[in-house]
Amino acid sequence: MHTPSKSSKKRLKLALLLSAIAAIALIFRLVHLQIISSNELRKGALEQWTKSIDIKSKRGVIYDRKGKKLAVSVNAFTVWATPAEIENPKETSKELSIILDMEEEEIYEKITKQERVEKLKQWITRDEANELRAQNFKGISIVDDNKRYYPNGNFASYILGFTDIDNNGLDGVEKTYDEYLTGVSGKWIKMTDASNRQLPYDGEQVHDPKDGRSIMLTIDETLQYFAEKAAQQALVDNKAKNVSIVMMDPSTGDILAMAAKPDFDPNNPREPLDPKQKEEWKNLPTEELTDKWYDLWRNFAISDVYEPGSTFKVITAAAALEEGTTSSDSHYYCNGTIKVQGETLKCANWYNPHKDQSLREAMNNSCNVAFVNIGRELGQENIYKYIKGFGFGEKTNIDLLGEQPGIIPSSADAIKELSLATMSYGHGIAVTPIQLLSAVSAISNGGNLMKPRLVKEMINDEGDIEKSFEPEVIRKVLSKETSDTMLSLMETVVSDGSGSRAQVPGYKIGGKTGTAQKIIDGRYAQGKYIGSFLAVAPTDEPRIAMLVIVDEPSGQFYGGSTAAPVAQSIFEEIFNYLEIAPEIDEDSEEEIIDIVKVPDIRGKSIGEVGKILKDLDLQYTTEYIEITDETKIIDQFPQPGVEVQQGSIIDLYIDMQPIDKVNMPFLRGKEKAEVIKILDEMNLQYSLNGQGKAQSQDPLPGQEIKPDTKIVVEFE
Ligand SMILES: [Zn+2]
């Protein structure tokens, strides 16, 4: 995943700049009207001035797909002063300060300004407005105004976005549909004489504003609620940095839910919701604070790119099935490792090789070696064709700001043997969550890549549908046959494979787990992972495609243990809400299978564990590539003593520390201080002999070292 998306920042900054320019333009226009044009007006028979105050139009409503209001405009009132008409500023300030809860001096300063009109306070309550009206102060006017209000607080904030104080959309659909939602401002015009007094015979004119039109989103409020609740729970459970959940209707490309935590309240987008963070932000310099805001508003689902890891195996498998380079009958042999261009690529279970693997088993067990072979047979040209075909490397053009295209090879020729191999299991390519979700929707809907749809309809101020957006097929990527095969393969990943923790009894859910190390500033970040789970259900007639991403979980980090259980909890609620009946009759499925007790394997090495589990006819998975024979098991799922069926898969959690390997840096010729800095940053142990510049080093540059490797550097 990449650090803050510069382009979305730029866009937002540009939006802010543009609104500033618009404001300046308006000021120029007012100056022109009030000062420059006045010279001409003065020449007229009537020495009169025209002044006007904008009456804000009401922004349209943002609805969910069932007509629930997600963003509304509420009535508010704004107080204006006409300084020239105020007879006793001192007294007026005093009385106003009580009603408006403002400082007396501040009011005095405003109502004595050499201005035709001056805004005193924006958005006062109805009670305040009533009291002001009752007092009937001379030179004080109340103008009907309105204010954007998000009744559910931080609900769906990344979709809705927010507005500024002048009701201009700044982010989310508020921004992308701003022109439509805004409406046309009205005007309140007063004719006044040269000393700003209202001309008695002319009165005033009010031109009513034209309210904005409304939009109906594809979001389902209930599904969004499930996603938000589950994301918040997963954030806490995993002590993660971020959790993102997106749901799509595979047949239409409709975004049904898009949640990310932590998030913000669009009613107050510049204040973090976490009280601790709020305190921390108080003393930040403006520049730093601005960066924090952009970070907070960045929508992970569209603005962050990450290495998909094993979830990408569904793309490789679908491409290879479609091209006929693999089939359900194909078999692969896994030795645990495979050498490509001098590099040894490993399977998660390399110590206990998968051996003979059918395509289905390779998916279930997430066998990297099998997928390297599937990728090889598919070839550079074809894998590139499908990377492009599924829409990776280009924006999906969802109706939101800040979307990133991801990172893919520049051409088929640019894919070398090694990158073909690693790409086959999802490394060396960067995608956005929305791209991956669109791709799996295509895989499960019969093969059509759909454009993600976020807005269904535009509704005019009379409540009639003004424009409908139809589902849009971008291109056909797969045949129905491949799509069906893929659904069946994904189904057994959940029923029998690494996605078992997404199971909901009685239902057919398809899925694929993924775990990838994060890339920060172009390098793999030690100990930082993204666990993800890609799912589709029910597999007989897919209605929901879902992607759950747990970013930087603490502790367990495998997608199978961090993200799959999140999908499980959401699916349980969805099946109930959408009234999807169970497909599998649990009773008829009962076969005579031996039950075994899960042994306690914690603290043992992976070598021992392999033998113990094999004797009990149990399988295991770790999803992690870099395993050595020293690797110790620190935890397991299910826990010891739990009764499971023979053949069940036990998730192993391994101790990461001893296996973090790095390459020896090049130190020769460097000053001692610099050498110390480099080695300290890498957390290495060393002994340095002599002074001056480094002359020799052991180990040599580029050699693989472990954190406990003792490094010796000789200086001149
Ligand atoms: Zn394997």
Image (cartoon, rainbow, N blue to C red):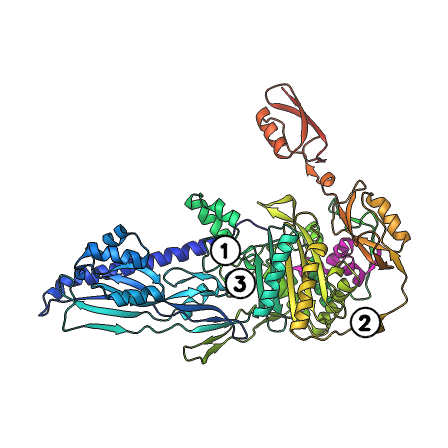
Q: Which labelled disc corresponds to residue 155?
A: 3
Tell which of 406 and 389 is nearer to you: 406
Q: Which labelled disc corresponds to residue 297?
A: 1
State the image coordinates of residue 509 (x, y, percent, origin top left).
72, 67
Q: Can you tell which of label 1 and label 3 is closer to the viewer?
A: 3
Mark 1 to mark 3: distance in Å? Answer: 13 Å
Residue type beneath disc 3? Phe
Mark 2 to mark 3: distance in Å? Answer: 37 Å
Residue type beneath disc 2? Glu
Which residue does the numbered mark 2 point to in the structure image?
A: 586
Residue 391 in view: no
Q: Quadrant of residue 333?
A: bottom right
State the image coordinates of residue 195 (x, y, percent, origin top left).
13, 61
Q: Residues within 10 Å of mark 1 (few under 14, many from 20)?
A: many
Q: Quadrant of residue 388?
A: bottom right
Q: Residues within 10 Å of mark 3 (few under 14, many from 20)?
A: many
State the image coordinates of residue 109 (x, y, percent, origin top left).
23, 52
For the C terminus, give its image quadrant: top right
